[in-house]
Image (cartoon, helix red, strand yellow):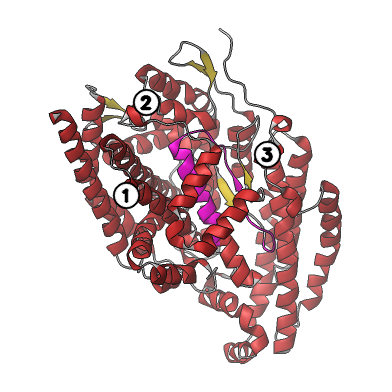
Amino acid sequence: MATKTKLPDRSEVLEEYTWKMEDMFSSDEAWEEEYQKLEKEMENLSSFQGTLENSAEALYQALRFYSDIACRMERIIVYANQKLHQDTRNGKYQGFAGKAKNLGVKFDGISSYLEPELLAIKEEQLKEYLADNKMAEFKQYIGNLLRQKEHVLSKEIEKILSMTGEFSDTADDVYSMFNNADIKFPSVTDENGEEVLLSHGTYISYLENKDRRVRKEALEKYYIPYQEHENVLASLYAANAKKDAFYAKVRHYSSAREASLKNSNIPLSVYDNLIKAVHESFPIFYKYMALRKRALQVEKLHMYDIYVPLIQEQEKKITFEKAKEMVKEGLKPMGEEYLKKLEEGFQNRWIDVYENQGKRSGAYSWGAYGVHPYVLLNYHDSLDNVFTLAHEMGHALHSYYSDANQTYMNAAYKLFVAEVASTCNESLLIQDMLKKTEDRKEKMYLINYFLDKFKGTMFRQTMFAEFEKITHEMVEQGENLTKEGLKKIYHELNELYFGPDVVIDEQIDMEWARIPHFYNSFYVYQYATGFSAAIALSKRILELGEAGVKDYMKFLTGGCSKYPIELLRDAGVDMESTEPVKEAIEVFQALVKQLEELMDEEDGI
């Protein structure tokens, strides 16, 4: 059989659907010129060593120079990596990314004296310096350092640790090259009997196929390359966990998890309470799985049955142009100014839209201070991708507003709040669509879709977070992570989370190996906490109108000028309490009940 689908090469993608990297550097030559300049100029940072305690002016000049170099360094790194992500097979941009990383390591080495020397200044003297108005932009940065003073080491050790940056991300780098450039998926036979290619971008669309045979074949074949390389993948995962444990131990943290959370001043209890609250909600999640089994009329619900829409009649092909209009309509409650900025992103090529050969999988928003943010998509004509567009533009506008209202040192929001703005956009969009439809089947379709967002964000991401917690604790206790052990842990967690109505297919035991976020440890829990905060914030925006938006904009413009929990509290949500998580689960429960009632009505017709 002939292959039906072939991804285009990068050169075949229309320019209007690619991001405009010229807004960051006009050409590759301009990037290389800046690279050479920066490599020389960053050496001057050494001249400030030994001067920080001399005066407020001396400290300011050192931090000012450091900030300016770091800002330029960010552009070098983002441009190189985003050009690589267009086609990860491209040797030129592999070289750019490698050079950018090496320059970053060099910068870390040159600046490694800064924090230990700053913290060596007597606290009274430092407070006196901070009283100078000129130091205002550095107050939060220095305050955060003082809070973690016990974890900053001597100049000599900090310099050595900075030198490890050249190889500390090797596990992540190797995994990324495997998962994006080298991995080869088999083809599957679609519902029309034709061979079609599997890819990261198409996998979920095949799991959403109404033909159960196609779904089953897609799941079984997608995991073949992971199963074939399970020894290597287990070794990479273990190496990354060992790296995290090493840095946590050297810096005197109790665990890698504490090291990750403490950077944003997040109590460990927030992480633990999330897992506890989700565990307590399992009965209602199991009920949703039972409803799914009932709707699909299957004797056993398999893992390849949990993505397919329950109301097939409402499946729609949604073009990218239509998706943009839907997102704008859904975000009208955010007000005219927000919509204007959203449209600017749509019209000015902030977005790299479609999948091509070698392109990085998934979706993200990234950028550098002083340049508009960018969004990478692998857009397919589905409702899920409409919400991905809303999600990533939420990230992008969060970055835009933070950058526009904060200095470089106070602009980059912390990971804990990274998923709030993106998920708030999704919540506003789905609620707009539910409000406007009067068709029972379409309402069922949308409710099912919203429930699946809960499933994928509240439940699965919490399961991922629990997997990380278990495996990292094993490493910290001196236990080895083997392929058998990783598969067993993951299998048992799936059984726990999905409940008695779902068969955990053996291929799913390798799912941990396809999650890139596991190489950015203790990130995924923030999808769930961010989702909870977003549900609460979207509710406030819809109920309070302009006042709710005004509070929300305090958060969007805040960057990292305050700690994440303080920023969310200013917007009206207290994440130190369990209320946002419980409120999200209550919404989920109400939606399950509503879906069940609509299904009963359908059966009664």
Tell me the quarter of the image containing the C terminus: top left
Secondary structure, mark 2, is helix
The part of the image, by quadrant, that contains residue 35 is bottom right
Residue 380 location in percent, x, y? 52, 33
Residue 506 is labelled as 2
Residue under numbered circle 1: 435
- Farthest left residue in view: 604
Residue type at tag 3: Gln
First in sequence, mark 2 or 1: give its number.
1
Residue type at tag 1: Lys
The part of the image, by quadrant, that contains residue 299 is top left
Which callout, 3 or 1, points to the residue nearer the camera?
Answer: 1
Residue under numbered circle 3: 86
The alpha-carbon separation of the residues under discs 2 and 3 comes to: 33 Å
The alpha-carbon separation of the residues under discs 2 and 1 comes to: 40 Å
Query: Could one spot residue 141 in this view of the protein?
Result: yes
